[in-house]
Amino acid sequence: MGKGSLVNNTFRATARLQAVLLLAAIGSLAYAGEQGADLDLDGPEMGGGQENASNPLASVSNTDVRWQYLDGFVDRGRLNDYFIDGAFMVNPKLKVKYELHYWETNITGRSESDVERALVKLIYFPKQGILSSGTKYRLAIGMDYINDFDHQDKGIGQGADQIAPFVGIALGLKSGTTLIPLLQQFVDVSGVDVNITAARLIALQPLPGNAWVKLDAKVPYDWENDTVPAEVELQYGINFNQTFALYFDGKAGIGGDKLYDWAAGIGLRFKY
């Protein structure tokens, strides 16, 4: 089997799994009861009285200050990504997420640093409640706008402003685990051509001591370059109280199309 066939089959299998999970969950909503804004997907033991903001579909407001180091980034370079990652609830059905990234990297052969991108994500929750099985759910649709600051001469950024519609669902299982399958399409609105379909699956599990662990797998298919730069992230965090949390993450690129070898980072979370 050639590389192109393996890449296509890997993406199709992952996308098919995501689609099955989404369709099965969405299809069962006809049997679900509607519940208001007080629905807690992961329980107070997970977020110190709030849902965990590591779930992008959580109904919470937060600001995270983060740093990640990526090794073997694009032709064996390094990358330090310093960023703010936050969100606020406009109302119980509308959430706004935002990110601002600053890179320091040597992929051009010299050390360069500058603002990389800003992202604004609108998330609308059309329906939430409890399925007949007792599983809590929250359906989400939305759109990203990504503004690239055009510093490709420094090896910083992708070189394109983008929009990215998505659909996802958060499922709070009776075991305490929260599963979040998502599908998203990235396309350019200016700059270089971008056409990426990304399948993503997140699993969040509460731990004793008001801690949590998160597994985040991303499998994007780049239609322009016929590549799958997949990655997986493992995060461990602890809530010290209802307003402050600390977490650590480790990441790894997967397969022959990976953008980096491994990564590690730390984040401070402020909840309000």
Image: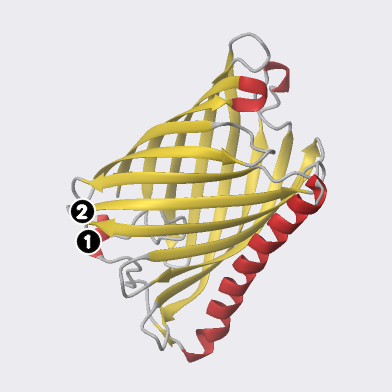
Q: Which of disc 1 and disc 2 is earlier in sequence? A: 1
Residue at x 69% of width, y 38% of height: 257
Local crowd size for mark 1, using a 10 Å CA cut-off: few (<14), some (14–19), many (≥20)? some
Q: Mark 2 points at which residue?
A: 210
**Farthest front residue?**
1
Give coordinates of residue 60: x percent, y percent. 37, 57
- Cα–Cα gap, marks 2 and 1: 6 Å
Give coordinates of residue 223: x percent, y percent. 80, 48
Q: Which residue type carries mark 1?
A: Glu
Residue at x 45% of width, y 35% of height: 84
Q: Which residue type carries mark 2?
A: Asn
Instruction: Out of 132 and 101, give the one closest to the viewer.
Output: 132
CB contact under 8 Å: marks 2 and 1: yes
Mark 1 secondary-structure assignment = helix
Give coordinates of residue 216: x percent, y percent. 48, 51
Looking at the picture, does residue 259 appear above or below residue 8?
above
Instruction: Out of 254 and 45, give the one closest to the viewer.
Output: 254
Instruction: Out of 174 and 120, give the one closest to the viewer.
Output: 174
Q: Mark 1 points at which residue?
A: 45
Classify residue 94 as left or right of residue 185: left
Image quadrant of residue 167?
bottom right
Classify residue 30 as left or right of residue 215: right
